[in-house]
Image (cartoon, rainbow, N blue to C red):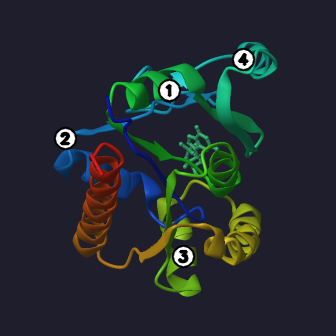
Amino acid sequence: MVKGILFVLSGPSGTGKGTVCKKLLEREKELCLSVSMTTRECREGEIPGVTYNYVSKETFKGMIDNDEMLEYAVYNGNYYGTPREAVDSLLSSGKDVLLEIEPQGALQVKKLFPEAVLIFLVPPSMKELKNRLVSRGRESSEEIEERIKAAKWELAQAEKYSVHIVNDDLDVCTQNIIDYLNEKRGERRMIDKLINEEA
Ligand code: 5GP
């Protein structure tokens, strides 16, 4: 059985990772989203077990100690992470898996899975990034300034990713990601075919 590909969608807060991810999953039915675990509160409209698995800090820390997290990060005072087991079994059964995670986690994945495909979502401009953070109305103005500062550091890590895709127009951005996924799938298929070919 040929293993699936691990795709990681990441980028600074406010670049639209969540929206792009949703659109991508609507169009790419074969792609399996890994449901993350978090210690933050469930927000209105979110579905436990679908949006996230919501757990206590004790449970989360226990999973870290037992090496059950593929990656994790502390973000805004809460833990967020990818449970290892589900991802391993999906990849082993040949499914392609998508992680939608912030950049600290994405770089941990790259260390553990050098073959993972890391997609860095780029904002069209810093002004637009700020506008998006302001208009979603979740953070205070101090927090927004912190996010902008963090975004500059995160942008400086972009060279460690497989590809950079600008999220200016949602449909164009989603299509560019799908084209890239298909290119990577084609490359993997070609290599697997060669490995299994008689000389
Ligand atoms: P939110 O609280 O808005 O749902 O998510 C906050 C941030 O955590 C987002 O940037 C999101 O991409 C990131 N995130 C969600 N799940 C995970 C995860 O499993 N691991 C890491 N490292 N980040 C995550």
Q: In this rendering, is residue 38 above or below 66? A: below
Tell me whether circle 4 and circle 1 mark residues in contact (CB < 8 Å): no
Q: How far apart are marks 4 and 1 (CA)?
A: 16 Å
Q: In this rendering, is residue 46 above or below 55? A: below
Q: Position of residue 18 (x, y in %)?
A: 42, 52
Q: Disc 2 or 1, which lies upstream in sequence?
A: 2
Instruction: Name the image quarter holding the N terminus.
Output: top left
Packing grade of label 1 (10 A; few <14, some 14-19, many >=20) is: some
Residue at the extreme front: 199
Query: Of tags 2 and 1, which is closer to the observer?
Result: 1
- Report ligand 1 position as a quadrant: top right
Q: Distance between the residues labelled 3 and 1?
A: 34 Å
Q: Viewer-proximal residue, 8 or 136?
A: 8
* Pointer 1 residue: 88
* Pointer 4 residue: 63
Residue type, label 3: Leu
Residue type, label 4: Met
Q: In this view, does 179 lie to the left or right of 98?
A: left
Packing grade of label 2 (10 A; few <14, some 14-19, many >=20) is: few
| Number of on-image labels | 4
* Pointer 2 residue: 29
For label 2, the SS is loop
* Pointer 3 residue: 129
Q: Viewer-proximal residue, 190 or 95?
A: 190
Q: In this rendering, is residue 147 above or below 115? A: below
Q: Disc 4 or 2, which lies upstream in sequence?
A: 2
Q: Position of residue 130 (x, y in %)?
A: 58, 76
For label 1, the SS is helix
Residue type, label 1: Asp
Q: Residue at x 60, y 65 (%)?
A: 12
Instruction: Determine the image quadrant of residue 85.
Output: top right
